[in-house]
Structure formats: C-alpha cells, structure tokens
Image (cartoon, rainbow, N blue to C red):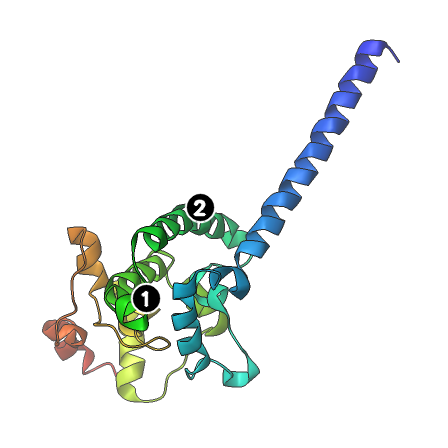
Amino acid sequence: MTALQKGAIGTLLTGALLGIVLVGVVFGGEAALSTDEFCTSCHSMTYPQEELRESTHYGALGANPGCKDCHIPQGFKNFHLAVYTHVVDGARELWLELVNDYSTLEKFNERRLIMAHDARMNLKKWDSVTCRDCHRNPDPPGDDAQAAHKRMETHGATCIDCHQNLVHEEAPMTDLDASKAQGKLVLKADDWDDWDEDDDDDDDDDY
C-alpha cells in the first residue's frame, strides 16, 4: 500500500469519526434541549408547566406529557422539524424572554394570546403531528363530532383548528387559515365551526 493510499484511508477514517461525533452532538443536544428542565430554565415557562400539570392531559391514560410532547415533533422522521423549532423559534423566544417582563403571571398573560397563537400556528404547519403521536385514528363519540372529523378531509383542517385551550389557561381562539392567509393574528368568529352552510345541507344526507 502506497503512502498516498494510506493517507486517503486515514482521511476517510478521520472524516467518518468526525461525522459520528457530529451526529452524536446534534442528537444529544436536541435531546438535552427538549427536557422540561431546559424549557423551564426560563422562569416564564414555569407558568404553562404548572397549567399542564393541572390539566386533564396530565396523568391521562397513565401518561405524564412534558413540553416536548406537544411543542417539539418527535421521532427520526420529524427530526428536521425539531431542529428547526429549536434553532428558529428557540432563538426568537429567547430574545423575547430578554426584552419582555414575565416576572409575574399578570405580565405573562399580557402576551399569552400571542404566544398561544404562535404555538397553534406551529401545530397547524405540522398537521398537528404531536397530537397525532398520541391520538391516533381518533373515533369521537357523537354524530356532530364524527361529522366534524370527516369534514377535516375536505376542508384542510387539522386537530388544532378546533381543539384549542385544552391544556393551558384559556386564550381567545384564533382562525389559523385566515391568520396564515393574511399574515397576522385573526381571531376566530363565533360561527367559525358552522363551516360552509351549503356543505352542511349536503352532509345531512350522509351522516
């Protein structure tokens, strides 16, 4: 084996080793950034954490979900979403933590709607993937709920369009489709879930 060949093999082995180390750092860092301890290292996040622990989602079916279970897409196939969320949203939230006063719950509540809407828009963008990780193939009781779930297939809706304010303190519901189209927060109209009246008339024969 020539010196050139030995050098090439050494370079390949070094590159492979560095690649393995880099992958370990990325996956390990992602796991560390997804812990409740890290999330609540910002004082303001202790408020929603306490709300989670008092909600019906905590302890349901023997599970105690943490921040990441709802707010960070899980699994290898969603790893790019998790990294993007930490890099982009995490940097933004850190900046907002520095420039805003969240020293009391009252001050936190002044921005609750904005933060709730941002979280809802993420879920909308992900097709509520974190909801679906636990709630697979939901089969809700009642004709109205069954009809609403079937309409999701034709109206492009996802879990978070209807299921808001399930865990944290209530914030006004937002129309996520209108918000996306207009590029700003749009509150949901009282009759939003009436869908399209013409569709309703047609659906009466189907359900």
Tell me the mark number nearer the camera, choosing from 1 and 2. Answer: 2
| Tag 1: amino acid | Thr
Count of numbered labels shown in the rendering: 2
Q: Position of residue 84 (x, y in %)?
A: 44, 47
Look at mark 1 in the image and give the residue it sits on.
Answer: 158
- How many C-alpha atoms fall within 10 Å of the one at disc 2: few (<14), some, or many (≥20)? few
Q: Which residue is mark 2?
A: 87
Outermost right residue: 1
Q: Which mark is residue 148?
A: none
Q: Quadrant of residue 8?
A: top right
Taking the spot 24% from the left edge, 81% from the top edge, the residue there is 206
Residue 25: x %, y % from top left: 63, 44
- Specify whether 97 is left or right of 3: left
Q: Is residue 53 above or below residue 43?
A: below
Res. 110 image quadrant? bottom left
In the rendered image, the vertical position of residue 11 relative to residue 181, given as above or below: above
Q: Secondary structure at mark 2?
A: helix
**Residue at image point 18% right, 50% down:** 183
Q: Position of residue 114 (x, y in %)?
A: 25, 61
Placement of the N terminus among the 4 image quadrants: top right
Q: Give the distance between the C-alpha atoms of the residues marked 1 and 2, in whole angstroms.
A: 25 Å
Where in the figure is residue 171, as x and y percent of width and height? 25, 72
Decide which of tag 1 and tag 2 comes sooner along the chain. Answer: 2
Q: As displayed, is residue 12 above or below residue 67?
A: above
Residue lying farthest bottom?
Answer: 142
Quadrant including the C terminus: bottom left
6 or 25, nearer to the observer: 25
Q: Amino acid at mark 2?
A: Val
Q: Secondary structure at mark 1?
A: loop
